[in-house]
Image (cartoon, helix red, strand yellow):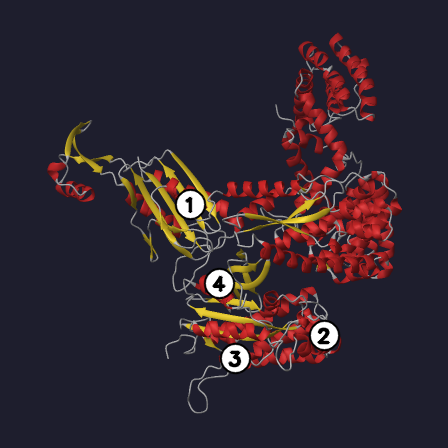
């Protein structure tokens, strides 16, 4: 087909253009290490409260335990998710989603696209929703979720969340078998670059650091620090020195994200036992809930200004 | 008599919920309609991934008027009473009837509620059904408050009468019922209207939707087997998968694909599991070799390239999945061939339960116990111990990490790769069994030894930390474990005093929580305890073992002994349930449990079966009545005299012929009963007891037990005691009803 994208970045650009044309604010990635696009405050916090919201963005995501030194054809400790979040979820969200697949060259007349039950739950965020994983010819290409609860709060109205695993989706569209062989920019470019040209070395470096070298005592201390700071921020009395009431939900939430990522790093180092695991997840969830509690008292969280 | 057609059209309903939901819709609607006074001739429910459909035939057009009579006050009653009655009925005085009553004339109100048109009732019942629908999990969407399994898009609700079809007016949370629906999401997305169920089903089919799930399943199976047959292959049957796949498609299109040559050497179970769990593929095997060579996938759409792109995509995904599986398998084989040490060591890091230690700890106990049990089930102790040591190693393998359901099976493959004895390898798979009441129990001796050790360890461990099943809660599946032990013992005819292995594990647990020095000693004692046949010794040795290893918080000798009795009672309870299903009465089992050696379940069941069968015969009645007669008189005398008559009946004090005859009969019976009991031929023993009925009856007819002569009286009571003792040797007949 003539209209097939030719590179990883073209797929991203087409998604950006598609969702921008459907009225989404195209946000930039959040500038912190997160495990998934859902952690971006543009999803976690903005799915709370009554104010309408529509955003789309690429989010670099880190899962230290998934590092494979760049050798696995599709598993990496750093990858990209494309995230769309619309509140309230529009009635034609499935059709909008299918339109986005068409935009990147997946023609429903040739492929078998299916919505297969998949309930989503994030124990760290105290969040859950119902939806599907979307299959294209037997491959999972996206996650489709109607948020029911985030940070322990019922989502009213409900946000619809779409998450595309960009590498996997792009590999499928571009017909590439190993992620590192995937063209990142147009292969006809003067300087063609593959995904591997950009990320193979970093996958090796991070895999080694994640698994063998990261200083666990330091990580543990940072976890405790982030936890303490999150609590301190939220318990700081109002008003501020100029007499203004400013709830610092976002700075606190940054600390929650940090704690979550530090936990993932500790996990990759293999120093968290099965029983401790639940306890750590519970600690992060407690932070996420506190941040959610704080956010819903702010104007962006729908509180009367 | 109109027909009713309802369709609830939504985003994709999880496959596993569809059938149940269609039935729920039918039940909610028909129950509601009947309750409101309508009747119907027939109802049928259908489901596809995007719709629940209900067709009701021959619905009454309106509910019957309901006539109600209410009795009021007497005509002579004071005015306020009459006014009150008028208010409550909404009538005026001239609308009341007066009737004769016992006490004079009274007012009667005759109220008729007019019948309601079916459409009104349907709208009301459907609204309620939608709002209270019992989905296992439901959700909200957009800004609405309605809950459904996934967003509900449209409601079709049509009454079809002789003069045409009419939409039932109904609005649920902004969704207005109509007469339209849509076809296949991609092949026929446009809305269309329908006029009847027949019209609906036919138009759906034209719009590439097969309404009936069984028809979809049949198409899939038919096409799949045909395509396989053409290649001389067979589709591996899997009714669960077929039902699930039929719930994932509205328009099934069967495609058969190839499995890459690189993957054909994977164990067939791995291929099947990977394809089924990840991709919902059917496996296609070569009947000549038993190897799985192809797969069947079911697409939900027809494409212009006849599914070529779809198949290529699926094949690619499968290759990626199987590459993972192959990678895992080859890695695992390397560890297995090196003796599995990595895995065995790794089990230290796998918590079994935080109060019961790691899987590694558990394996130490099971291995020691399996060794002790081995001789009792005809297994080689060394093999049993070795089997127990490696039986759970595969929990650490990559393959089982990926597919937990392959645990055990992979253990067997890996044990064989490690060149272990085939019996040992078999135990790696079979020791998990039986997984449920209908699962086969292991029969190979080594497997039985390990399986028994495993389950007895589990039960004892959870008893030790007081995590017993309560009511409907049994999170550690202890009832299943106990039933597994019972079935393994009974089906293999194992002779084993359960108290011994239980005591062994208790001892092991108790000693395990202390230092190494005492552990060794306690362990030795516990081991010894398990070897002794008689429970009483086990208990006393157990006491010693606890005393040596004392000062643990959980391990006072009394609590441990009580725990042992409690766990044995749990086994007996499970056994009762098990035997009840086989038609053995509760009281019969209780009568046998009351006998010594009741922790030997095979013996116990032998007794119970013999008693149960025997009680169904005339001789059984004779035994019971003879015994009861003797026992009643004896018990009364014992209660009255405050002594137990249990010894010293002497024929020389026998006064009458009947008395002498009874002595002789008891001697004869004794001679027959003793060897029968030795041989555990309980039926023969009871036959001999039953033969006592006639001499007992003759005795009671001719002889007055409570003779004035105390010597005669005592002798007679002691004689009755002999009867009691003899008749009680198989079971405690005082517990048998009737």
Is residue A49 at least partly visible in the picture? yes
Q: Are marks 4 and 2 in contact (CB under 8 Å)?
A: no
Question: Is the residue marked by circle 1 packed among few (<14), some (14-19), or many (20+) residues within 10 Å?
Answer: many
Q: Are marks 2 and 3 in contact (CB under 8 Å)?
A: no
User: Residue at horizontal 64%, vertical 36%?
Assistant: B577
Nearer mark to the viewer, of 1 and 4: 4
Q: Are marks 1 and 3 in contact (CB under 8 Å)?
A: no
| Label 1 and label 3 in one chain | no
Which numbered tag is attached to residue B53? 1
Quadrant showing the C terminus of chain A: bottom left
Question: Is the residue marked by circle 3 packed among few (<14), some (14-19), or many (20+) residues within 10 Å?
Answer: few
Q: Which residue is mark 3?
A: A28
**Quarter occupied by residue B649:** top right
Question: Is the residue marked by circle 2 packed among few (<14), some (14-19), or many (20+) residues within 10 Å?
Answer: many
Q: Which residue is mark 4?
A: A98
Q: Which residue is mark 2?
A: A207
| Label 1 and label 4 in one chain | no
Q: Secondary structure at mark 4?
A: helix
């Amino acid at each position: 087909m003539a209209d097939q994208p030719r590179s990883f970045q073209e797929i991203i650009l087409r998604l950006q253009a598609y969702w921008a044309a459907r009225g989404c604010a195209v946000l930039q990635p959040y500038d912190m290490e997160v495990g998934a696009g859902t952690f971006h405050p543009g999803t976690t916090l903005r799915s709370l409260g009554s104010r309408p919201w529509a955003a789309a963005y690429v989010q670099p995501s880190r899962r230290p335990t998934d590092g494979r030194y760049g050798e696995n054809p599709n598993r990496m400790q750093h990858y990209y998710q494309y995230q769309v979040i619309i509140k309230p979820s529009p009635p034609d969200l499935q059709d909008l989603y299918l339109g986005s697949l068409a935009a990147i060259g997946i023609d429903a007349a040739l492929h078998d696209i299916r919505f297969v039950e998949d309930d989503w739950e994030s124990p760290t965020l105290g969040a859950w929703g119902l939806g599907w994983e979307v299959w294209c010819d037997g491959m999972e290409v996206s996650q489709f979720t109607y948020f029911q609860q985030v940070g322990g709060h019922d989502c009213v109205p409900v946000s619809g969340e779409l998450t595309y695993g960009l590498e996997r989706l792009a590999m499928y569209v571009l017909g590439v078998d190993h992620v590192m062989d995937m063209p990142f920019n147009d292969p006809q470019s003067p300087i063609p670059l593959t995904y591997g040209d950009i990320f193979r070395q970093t996958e090796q470096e991070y895999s080694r650091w994640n698994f063998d070298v990261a200083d666990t005592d330091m990580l543990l201390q940072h976890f405790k620090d982030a936890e303490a700071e999150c609590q301190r921020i939220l318990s700081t009395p109002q008003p501020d020195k100029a007499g203004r009431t400013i709830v610092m939900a976002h700075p606190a939430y940054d600390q929650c994200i940090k704690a979550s990522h530090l936990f993932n790093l500790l996990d990759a180092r293999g120093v968290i036992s099965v029983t401790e695991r639940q306890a750590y997840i519970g600690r992060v969830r407690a932070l996420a809930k506190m941040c959610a509690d704080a956010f819903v008292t702010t104007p962006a969280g729908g509180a009367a200004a | 008599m109109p027909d009713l057609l309802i369709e609830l059209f939504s985003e994709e309903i999880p496959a596993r919920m569809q059938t149940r939901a269609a039935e729920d819709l039918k039940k909610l609607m028909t129950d509601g309609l009947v309750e409101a006074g309508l009747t119907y001739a027939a109802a049928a429910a259908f489901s596809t991934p995007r719709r629940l459909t209900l067709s009701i035939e021959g619905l009454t057009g309106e509910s019957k008027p309901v006539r109600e009579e209410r009795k009021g006050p007497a005509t002579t009653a004071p005015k306020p009473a009459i006014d009150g009655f008028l208010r409550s009925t909404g009538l005026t005085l001239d609308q009341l009837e007066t009737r004769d009553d016992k006490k004079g004339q009274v007012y009667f109100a005759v109220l008729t509620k007019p019948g309601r048109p079916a459409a009104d009732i349907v709208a009301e019942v459907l609204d309620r059904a939608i709002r209270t629908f019992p989905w296992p999990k439901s959700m909200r969407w957009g800004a609405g408050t309605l809950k459904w399994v996934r967003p509900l898009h449209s409601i079709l609700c049509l009454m079809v009468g002789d003069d045409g079809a009419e939409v039932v007016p109904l609005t649920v949370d902004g969704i207005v019922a109509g007469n339209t629906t849509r076809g296949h999401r991609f092949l026929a997305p446009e809305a269309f209207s329908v006029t009847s169920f027949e019209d609906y089903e036919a138009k759906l089919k034209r719009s590439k939707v097969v309404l009936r799930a069984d028809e979809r399943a049949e198409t899939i199976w038919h096409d799949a087997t045909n395509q396989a047959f053409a290649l001389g292959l067979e589709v591996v049957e899997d009714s669960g998968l077929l039902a699930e796949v039929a719930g994932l498609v509205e328009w099934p299109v069967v495609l058969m694909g190839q499995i890459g040559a690189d993957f054909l050497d994977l164990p067939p179970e791995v291929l099947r599991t990977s394809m089924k769990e990840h991709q919902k593929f059917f496996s296609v095997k070569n009947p000549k070799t038993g190897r799985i060579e192809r797969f069947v996938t079911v697409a939900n759409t027809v494409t212009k390239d006849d599914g070529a792109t779809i198949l290529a995509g699926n094949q690619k995904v499968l290759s990626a999945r199987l590459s993972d599986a192959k990678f895992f398998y080859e890695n695992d084989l390397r560890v297995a061939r090196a003796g599995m040490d990595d895995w065995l060591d790794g089990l230290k890091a796998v918590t079994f339960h935080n109060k019961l230690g790691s899987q590694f700890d558990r394996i130490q106990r099971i291995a020691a116990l399996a060794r002790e049990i081995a001789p009792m089930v005809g297994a080689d102790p060394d093999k049993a111990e070795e089997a127990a040591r490696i039986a759970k190693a595969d929990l650490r393998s990559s393959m089982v990490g990926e597919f937990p359901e392959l645990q055990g099976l992979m253990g067997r493959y890996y044990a064989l790769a490690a060149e272990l004895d085939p019996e040992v390898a078999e135990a790696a798979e079979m020791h998990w069994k039986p997984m449920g009441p209908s699962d086969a129990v292991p029969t190979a001796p080594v497997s039985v030894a390990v399986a028994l050790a495993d389950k007895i360890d589990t039960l004892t461990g959870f008893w030790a930390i007081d995590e017993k099943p309560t009511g409907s809660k049994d999170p550690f599946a202890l009832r299943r474990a106990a039933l597994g032990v019972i079935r393994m013992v009974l089906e293999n005819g194992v002779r084993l005093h359960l108290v011994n292995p239980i005591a062994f594990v208790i001892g092991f647990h108790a000693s395990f929580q202390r230092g190494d020095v005492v552990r060794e000693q306690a362990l030795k004692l516990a081991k010894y305890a398990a070897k002794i046949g008689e429970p009483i010794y086990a208990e006393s040795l157990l006491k010693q073992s606890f005393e040596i290893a004392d000062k643990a918080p959980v391990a006072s000798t009394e609590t441990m002994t009580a725990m042992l009795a409690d766990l044995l009672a749990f086994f007996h309870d499970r056994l009762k349930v098990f035997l009840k299903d086989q038609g053995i009465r509760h009281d019969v089992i209780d009568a046998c449990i009351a006998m010594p050696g009741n922790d030997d379940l095979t013996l116990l069941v032998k007794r119970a079966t013999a008693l149960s069968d025997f009680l169904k015969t005339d001789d059984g009645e004779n035994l019971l009545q003879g015994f009861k007669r003797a026992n009643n008189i004896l018990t009364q005398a014992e209660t009255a005299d405050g002594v137990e008559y249990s010894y010293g009946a002497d024929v020389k004090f026998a006064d009458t012929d009947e008395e002498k005859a009874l002595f002789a009969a008891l001697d004869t019976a004794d001679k027959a009963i003793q060897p029968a009991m030795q041989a555990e031929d309980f039926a023969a023993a009871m036959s001999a007891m039953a033969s006592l009925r006639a001499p007992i009856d003759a005795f009671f007819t001719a002889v007055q037990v409570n003779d004035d002569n105390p010597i005669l009286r005592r002798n007679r009571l002691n004689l009755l005691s002999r009867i009691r003792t003899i008749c009680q040797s198989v079971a405690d007949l005082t517990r048998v009803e009737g």
